[in-house]
Image: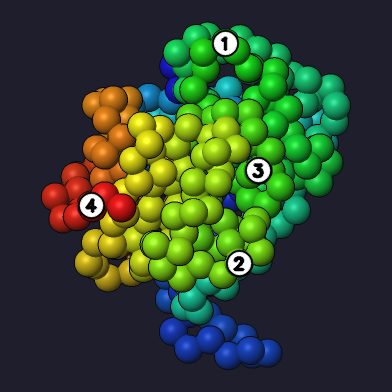
Amino acid sequence: MIYTVTLNPSLDYIVSVADFRLGMTNRTISEYILPGGKGINVSIVLKNLGIESTVLGFAAGFTGREIVRRIEELGLQNQMILLQHGVSRINFKLKSIEGTEINGQGPEISRQELEQLLGQLAGLQSGDVLFLSGSVPGSLPADIYAGMMQLLGGRGIKIVVDAAGEQLLKAALCHPVLIKPNHHELGELYGVELHTRKEAVPYAKALQEAGAENVLVSMAGEGAVLAAADGRIYGAPAPEGKLVNSVGAGDSMVAGFMAGLLESGDYLEAFKMGLAAGSASAFSENLAAGEEIRKVRERVSVYEI
């Protein structure tokens, strides 16, 4: 079974404004609401590829109930824990101005509620896949992902981590099957700026040497790099296409990689599927459908470094 954890999910309110003016009343020309959070995005893309998964995490208040309603409406299996207090966050994303977002803080999570989630994780079996993705709420330990991995260590569970900063390095030490920093996160971790695929290679290898089996580095328009568990290093330029929406592209890449790996057992094929899924979502209004991913997969060009 596949599980995704989203500790701080959201309702994403995504709007477009024709001519945004600061300090003035602006009216939208389009708007929609989606369940948000990196783990939820992974589950949606897996579903689009025909792979079932179970959503774990926390939801609170009226927004939390709406998140649950929407993910169940999408056909996802839901085991999110409903918190006693607070409300899940609403994240505001203004599509008219690239990269403009206002993200909420989210509710406080008690120790008892955290223990409930850890109890769910304790029930995972050998061969299960667990995605740990996204930011950690301030009420939880900053190294919670590493703590979860230590809880599950030695049990044959394949763990994927998509996080940033010290969380990323601590997770690598716990031998995940995959970690996926972007080039900014990887550069910040080692105090450098990374602009090209070649520049990213030694730092991807360093994370691999720290303990991660596969290190997948997303580099936006520059493509991606994979330090694979079999010792090979792959690079790929980004497939050609019009950037429509970058939200969820990294989550789609993680989902695509694991979908390819679980289906084929081949790291090269997994890399191609990851890049295709991430690019297809970037070329779409929402997270990419399976057909869109497979079409982009035909245009992916990979080389060995």
Would you name the residue on which mark 1 appears? Answer: 155
Q: Give the Cα distance between marks 4 and 1.
A: 33 Å
Q: Are marks 4 and 1 in contact (CB under 8 Å)?
A: no
Image height check: is 284 above or below 98?
A: above
Side (left or right) of 211 relative to 223: right
* Residue at point 38%, 36% (across, down): 231
* Type of amino acid under label 4: Val
Q: Earlier in the sequence, mark 3 or mark 2?
A: 3
Q: Earlier in the sequence, mark 4 or mark 1?
A: 1
Q: Mark 2 falls on what kind of element?
A: loop
Instruction: Kindly state the secondary structure of the residue where label 1 is placed.
Output: loop
Which residue is identified by label 3?
A: 169
Residue 111, quarter of the rendered image? top right
| Residue on which disc 2 sits | 192
Colour pattern of the rendering: rainbow
Above/below status of 68 relative to 24: above
- In percent of width and height, residue 15 lies at 49, 69
The residue located at (53%, 71%) in the rendering is 99
- For the residues labelled 3 and 2, say whether their Cβ atoms are less than 8 Å apart: no
Determine whether, in the image, residue 163 is placed left or right of residue 125.
Answer: right
**Which numbered disc flags the more N-terminal residue, 2 or 1?**
1
Other-residue count near label 4 (Cα within 10 Å), few / some / many at <14 / 14–19 / ≥20: some
Cα–Cα span, label 4 and label 2: 25 Å
> According to the image, label 4 marks what residue?
302
Instruction: Give the residue type at disc 1.
Output: Arg
Q: Residue at x 38, y 53 (%)?
A: 225
Within 10 Å of disc 3 (Cα), the crowding (few <14, some 14-19, many 20+) is some
Q: Which mark is nearer the camera, 4 or 1?
A: 4
Q: CA distance from mark 3 to mark 1?
A: 21 Å
Residue 198 in view here: yes
Select label 3 or label 1 by which is in front: 3
